[in-house]
């Protein structure tokens, strides 16, 4: 009888653990999904007039991978126009970010460290500020100076219409042939071996 009782307790204990585990998974999904969709809602809020809501589809961006990177020309913070095509033959990282996005700050710092290491090997980084307040962008960069080009997409057309960006930050890696080889959603740590390897493989 004692053995049977102990076995029953063990079974009950396992059941309780399973229930707790299931509850935690449910809680995680409840937290992650709203956070994901909040990015989309923010994108809707920032979307300029005349830009179709269907451009925010997370599936539209997939069609860019393996394709030639769409060219664009945007002003830097001094007003000078910078074209993507002017860096033909280089490995380019294009980061779409905004000053109101905390993860963007971390990725910008990480990219700055990466740039210091690989700039002499042909790495170009373009940080495209996708927001309507130029003052907010300027103040942000004053607090956190960067060594690569910061461009300003005031009407968000390049971000949303051309590159189908629906969340911040979003990062594209373009190879020496001008082909988009990778994309990443959300904050990336460019000191991680996996991310460094992506860049290294294209710089060879």
Image (cartoon, rainbow, N blue to C red):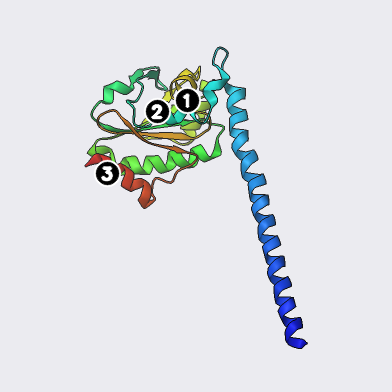
Mark 2 is surrounded, within 10 Å at the Cα level, by few (under 14), some (14 to 19) or many (20 or more) other residues, namely some
The residue that mark 1 highlights is: 164
Mark 3 residue element: helix
Residue depth check, mark 1 versus mark 2: number of the one nearer the observer: 2
Mark 3 vs mark 1: which is more N-terminal? 1
**N-terminal of the two: label 3 or label 2?**
2
Marked residue nearer the N-terminal end (1 or 2): 2
Q: Could you say which is closer to the camera, residue 7 or residue 204?
A: 7
In the image, residue 77 sits, relative to residue 199, either above or below, namely above
Say which of marks 3 and 2 sits in front.
Answer: 2
- Residue corresponding to mark 2: 64
Q: Residue furthest top?
A: 50
- Whole-angstrom CA distance, mark 3 to mark 1, is 26 Å
Q: CA distance from mark 1 to mark 2?
A: 9 Å
Residue 49 occupies which quadrant of the picture?
top right
Residue of label 3: 201
Residue 83 falls in which quadrant of the image?
Answer: top left
Farthest residue, direction bottom = 2
Q: Nearer the viewer, residue 91 or 76?
A: 91
Vertical relation: 71 (above or below) 23: above
**Contact check, label 1 and label 2, Cβ < 8 Å:** yes
Q: Give the CA distance from mark 3 to mark 2.
A: 20 Å
Q: Position of residue 91 (x, y in %)?
A: 28, 34
């Amino acid at each position: 009888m004692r053995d049977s009782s102990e076995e029953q307790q063990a079974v009950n204990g396992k059941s309780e653990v399973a229930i707790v585990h299931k509850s935690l998974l449910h809680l995680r999904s409840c937290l992650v999904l709203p956070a994901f969709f909040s990015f989309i809602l923010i994108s809707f809020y920032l979307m300029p007039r005349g830009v179709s809501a269907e451009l925010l589809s997370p599936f539209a961006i997939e069609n860019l991978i393996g394709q030639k990177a769409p060219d664009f020309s945007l002003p830097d913070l001094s007003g000078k126009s910078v074209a993507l095509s002017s860096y033909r033959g280089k490995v380019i990282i294009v980061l779409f970010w905004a000053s109101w996005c905390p993860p963007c700050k971390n990725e910008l710092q990480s990219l700055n460290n990466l740039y210091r290491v690989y700039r002499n090997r042909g790495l170009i980084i373009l940080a495209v500020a996708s927001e309507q307040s130029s003052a907010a962008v300027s103040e942000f960069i004053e607090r956190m100076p960067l060594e690569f080009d910061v461009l300003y997409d005031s009407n968000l057309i390049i971000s949303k219409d051309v590159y189908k960006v629906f969340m911040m930050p979003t990062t594209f890696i373009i190879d020496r042939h001008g082909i988009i080889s990778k994309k990443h959603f959300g904050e990336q740590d460019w000191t991680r071996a996996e991310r460094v390897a992506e860049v290294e493989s294209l710089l060879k």
